[in-house]
Image: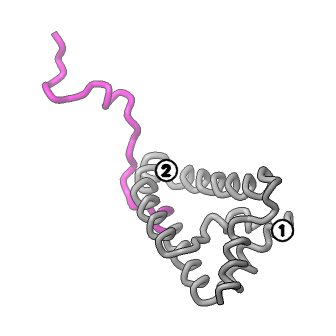
Amino acid sequence: MNETPVGENVSASAGSAVVRPGRPIVTYAVMGLCLLIFAWASADREGMFLHLVEPIRDLPSGWWALFSTALVHIEVSHLVFNLVAFLALGQIVELTAGKIRFAILLLLLAWMASFSQRYLNPGRPRSVYQEWFTESLDLC
């Protein structure tokens, strides 16, 4: 007879991921950076664009833009949706994988997104942010 108490799942203890105790600091830090950049864009769109997005044209000297563009959000709804989703999922992944692995994963994903937008879309020479910036200046 099976000696497992009723209601316990044997496979859950054998193969489940370990959740590390602590706070999801990386998740909170990324959310804070997104909010700061959004506040900067609200106050000075052109300055934010020129420092965080435009340098992607000058690779490799503008290498930081491969990561910073992942933190730029265009509208309030875009920011709120992404932060709610990131808070829900980021905490789980960070506490399961660990802070360092999670930070490496985020950097890798940001780089892959920027790289693919920059180099794997030859029919569209401008990025989404460049189009948004041009359109937003035309509206003003």
Question: Image quadrant for the N terminus?
Answer: top left
Would residue 40 be found to the left or right of residue 59 on screen?
left
23 within the magenta span: yes
Mark 2 residue crowding within 10 angstroms, few (<14) / some (14–19) / many (20+)? some
Disc 2 residue type? Gly
x and y percentages locating residue 110 in the rendered image: 65, 57
Element class at badge 1 = helix
Q: Judge by depth and name the residue closer to the eye, 59 or 29.
A: 59
Within the image, what quadrant is residue 103 found in?
bottom right
Give the image location of residue 7, x and y in percent: 16, 29
Q: Which residue is mark 1?
A: 57
- What residue do we see at 73% from left, 62% from top? 66
Q: Is residue 16 magenta?
A: yes
Residue plotted at (73% across, 56% down): 117
Question: Which residue corresponds to mark 2?
Answer: 98
Q: Decide which of 60, 126 is in the foreground and name it.
A: 126
Name the residue furthest left.
6
Q: Is residue 109 above or below residue 11?
A: below
Q: Provide residue 120's location: percent of width, then percent of height.
A: 78, 50
Report whether 48 appears left or right of 93: right
Give x and y (percent) for residue 114: 71, 58
Q: Main secondary structure of the magenta part?
A: loop
Tell me how many marks there are. Answer: 2
Front label number (1 vs 2):
1
Q: Secondary structure at mark 2?
A: loop
Provide the residue span drawn in magenta. Answer: 1-28
Q: Quadrant of residue 87?
A: bottom left
Q: Residue drawn at (69%, 66%), measured in percent from left and top?
A: 128
In primary-sequence order, the first of circles 1 and 2 is 1
Residue at image location 61% in from the left, 53% down from the top = 104
Which mark is drawn over residue 104?
A: none
For the residues labelled 1 and 2, the Cα–Cα distance comes to 34 Å
